[in-house]
Image (cartoon, rainbow, N blue to C red):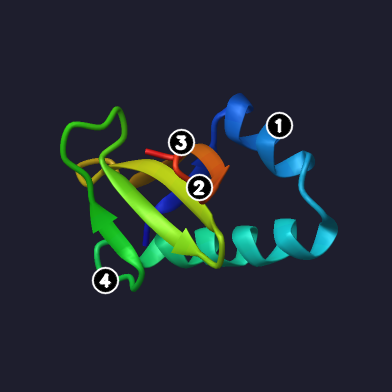
Amino acid sequence: MNEVSYTPRAAKQLRKLSAIENKSIRTACNGLSAMPNCSNVKALINHSCQYRLRVGNYRVFFNFDGVIHVVTIEEVKKRNENTY
């Protein structure tokens, strides 16, 4: 199992969301503890983060260190033309 942690930036972005959105995103992020066997995850190319998790209209950008088993949530953004 992997540990899921949030950067201060991602935690602040989550706090700004409604309680329902916050809960659904946190639930999906907790599922990342089974990384690399997760659904709705895509490896990114030419992006500051390694992976993207799709949760409804939101995208969770994160990095995964397979050696020490840590998933670090970097950003949570609403999906629009400026997301990527």
Q: Which residue is mark 3?
A: 82
Give the label, 3 or 4, closer to the camera: 3
Residue drawn 61% across and 66% down? 27
How much space separates mark 1 and mark 4, taking CA atoms?
27 Å
Badge 1 element: helix
Badge 3 element: loop
How much space separates mark 3 and mark 2, taking CA atoms?
5 Å
How much space separates mark 3 and mark 1, taking CA atoms?
19 Å
Q: Are marks 3 and 2 in contact (CB under 8 Å)?
A: yes
Q: On the rendered structure, is 35 left or right of 74? A: left
Residue 8 x/y as whole percent: 62, 26
- Other residues around mark 3 within 10 Å, as few (<14) / some (14–19) / many (≥20): few
Give the label, 3 or 1, closer to the camera: 3
Q: Mark 2: which amino acid?
A: Asn
Q: Which residue is mark 1?
A: 12
- Other residues around mark 4 within 10 Å, as few (<14) / some (14–19) / many (≥20): few
In which quarter of the view is residue 42 placed? bottom left
Q: Mark 3: which amino acid?
A: Asn
- Mark nearer the N terminus (2 vs 1): 1
Q: Which residue is mark 2?
A: 80
- Mark nearer the N terminus (3 vs 4): 4
Q: Mark 4: which amino acid?
A: Asn
- Other residues around mark 2 within 10 Å, as few (<14) / some (14–19) / many (≥20): few
How much space separates mark 3 and mark 4, taking CA atoms?
28 Å
Badge 4 element: loop
Q: Are marks 2 and 1 in contact (CB under 8 Å)?
A: no
